[in-house]
Amino acid sequence: MIRKVILVLGILIIGLSAFSLSMENNMIYGESGESVPVASYKKIVVIDPSSVEVFYLLGAQESIAAIGHTAKSPIWPYDKTPGLASVGSITKPSLEKVLSYTPDLVLLNAMISDFGLSLKQHSIKYLIVNADSVEDILDNLEILGVLCAKEKEAITLSQEKKSKLKKIKAEIRKNPLNMKGIFLYSTNPIMAFNSTSLSGQILEVVGVKNIAADLSADKPILSAEYILQQNPDFIIGAMSITSPQQIKDASPLIKSTSAAKKDKIFLIDSSKILRPSPRIVDEIENLYLELKK
């Protein structure tokens, strides 16, 4: 059975970016070229929030030995993950705690790729999971399904999400928003997400113009004058921003934008636009419907 799945996945992952998981010659490769044999792993320490969500979506949570916890954005399903064993935070996991679970595989997030070197010294298999696009997210889903023995479920879920995304895009083309807006990372300084970020790509999928799209830095600093000049129809805050008022208070000029006048300044849970989980397809739909109001 697994050979058939590998063949299907081999077709599906053609064209994957360098930042997503890939599979070739019975090996699965992570972001930095690290690899593990294609197999079903039973004791997985998951220090990658998106992979935790995938395991629950696939019904493979029993394969999770422990996770890395997050400081602010909770990990879905919110009523289940708080009870899981922890090896520390997703940015500073404890090597001692990881080793105490004698895992047969560790899944890392891209922020702590160097942690993999410590695992390698202890002969612990690991993969760095990352995705820079919605397509990467769904391709990663299929490969994660192989790792936790949920191949069929993963392919089915991936195809469902891809089909839903296709329908959402068709609806957006039929009823475009004709808006421009921005995702803010912080307000002091005012930092946004450009087009290369996952959140920037979400704006592209939704069919709105990201006023920070063409700026050079991944998280460009914007002046209030620039924002007023671009006059966005909406401003969405995330990460360290705790209230819409915080955005309005960043500069008196913000209050003169169409976003402020139309009361289209609001917050969104950072995990919904920054965490590369398959649930992001649903969040794209929710964002489109919210902006359409």
Image: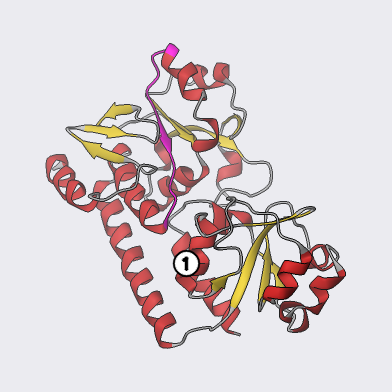
Q: Quadrant of the N terminus?
A: top left
Residue at image point 68% right, 47% down: 72
Tag 1: Cα neighbours inside 10 Å, few (<14), some, or many (≥20)?
some
Residue at image point 44% right, 81% down: 172
Q: Is residue 125 magenta?
A: yes
The answer to whether residue 199 is seen in the rendering is yes
Looking at the picture, which amino acid does disc 1 mark?
Answer: Asp
Q: Is residue 72 left or right of residue 205?
A: right
Q: Is residue 70 left or right of residue 195?
A: right
Note whether 133 is above or below 39 in the view shown: below
Q: Overall secondary structure of the magenta stretch?
A: loop
Residue 204 position, x and y percent, is 48, 68
Note whether 93 is above or below 109 in the view shown: above
User: Nearest the camera: 264 or 160?
Assistant: 264
Q: Is residue 173 left or right of residue 152?
A: right
Note whether 65 is above or below 72 in the view shown: above
Residue at image point 22% right, 50% down: 14
Q: Is residue 108 left or right of residue 142?
A: right
Q: Which residue is mark 1?
A: 282
Which region is colored magenta? 121-133
